[in-house]
């Protein structure tokens, strides 16, 4: 019989993430350094465990009208069907059609940071996305309606007591629909999510980082693939 334990493996993954976030909070004095370290912890988690069709990075998003999003700490995007990802002086720019999810990453969660994350997510969702019919061996599939872009907030701790109580849920529900945070993780306390029925604690306690990863993968599976980008809609800027 094998000596492996799935419980220990999944629990160990969370413990590693929580431990690294805690260390960043305690060991780094400069707020920007703490923030950068926190972002890197979440990015490394997703880069390691998401299927390779997905990529995760800190990035801006652009659409074919020339509009840009705010900078997103953790952007999950398609690399299989999206033909161009722009890189310039250490910055990454992703076309809106390729985006699956946008997350803000911070050390703690409070009312102001929830509103800040909602604004960031809204800046991505407001962008225009093209969609072309999809040729296949038997003909052509109609153009896919661009799917919902997931949005969320990733933190280590909560400023509220209880950490995932009514105060958090109230702030989440008061935001504009374009900025709705679908899924979030407070690594020291649990995960939360919002849908058409309201906002809820998804997994209190336990192993929140691992629970978040699994929930994100499940939601990405439901989204399926991104729309087929109209690359000519971007090419017109060559003559601008």
Image: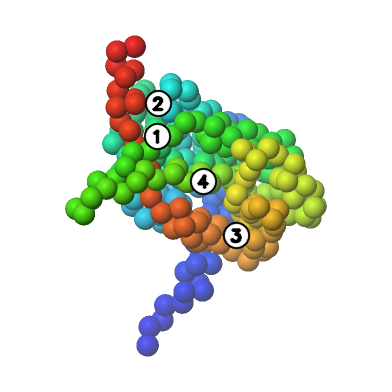
Whether residue 65 is situated above or below residue 127 in the rendered picture: above
CA–CA distance between discs 4 and 1? Answer: 14 Å
The mark closer to the camera, 4 or 1, is: 1
* Disc on the earlier residue, 2 or 1: 2
Residue 208 has which mark?
3
The answer to whether marks 2 and 3 mark residues whose Cβ atoms lie closer than 8 Å is no
* Disc on the earlier residue, 2 or 3: 2
Query: Where does residue 118 sit, x and y in percent of width and height?
Result: 63, 37
49 sits to left or right of 165: left
Residue at 58% x, 45% y is: 152
The mark closer to the camera, 3 or 4, is: 4
Q: Element under label 4?
A: loop
* Disc on the earlier residue, 1 or 3: 1
Q: Element under label 2?
A: loop
- Which residue has dot 1 on it? 130
Seen as rendered, the residue at the extreme bottom is: 1
46 sits to left or right of 104: left
The answer to whether marks 2 and 1 mark residues whose Cβ atoms lie closer than 8 Å is yes
Query: Where does residue 78 sit, x and y in percent of width and height?
Result: 37, 44
- Which residue has dot 2 on it? 64
């Amino acid at each position: 019989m094998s000596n492996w334990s799935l419980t220990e493996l999944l629990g160990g993954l969370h413990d590693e993430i929580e431990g690294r976030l805690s260390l960043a909070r305690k060991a780094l004095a400069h707020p920007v350094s703490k923030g950068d370290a926190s972002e890197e912890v979440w990015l490394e988690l997703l880069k390691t465990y998401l299927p390779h069709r997905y990529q995760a990075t800190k990035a801006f998003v652009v659409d074919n009208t020339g509009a840009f999003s705010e900078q997103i700490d953790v952007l999950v995007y398609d690399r299989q069907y999206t033909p161009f990802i722009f890189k310039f002086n250490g910055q990454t720019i992703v076309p809106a059609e390729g985006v699956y999810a946008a997350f803000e990453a911070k050390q703690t969660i409070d009312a102001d940071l929830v509103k800040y994350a909602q604004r960031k997510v809204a800046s991505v969702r407001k962008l225009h996305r093209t969609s072309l019919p999809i040729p296949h061996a038997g003909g052509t599939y109609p153009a896919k309606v661009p799917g919902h872009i997931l949005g969320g907030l990733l933190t280590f701790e909560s400023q509220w007591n209880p950490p995932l109580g009514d105060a958090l849920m109230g702030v989440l529900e008061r935001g504009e629909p374009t900025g709705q945070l679908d899924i979030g993780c407070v690594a020291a306390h649990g995960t939360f999510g919002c849908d058409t029925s309201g906002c809820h604690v998804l997994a209190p306690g336990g192993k929140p980082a691992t629970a978040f990863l699994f929930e994100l993968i499940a939601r990405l599976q439901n989204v399926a693939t991104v729309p087929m980008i109209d690359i000519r809609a971007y090419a017109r800027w060559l003559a601008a």
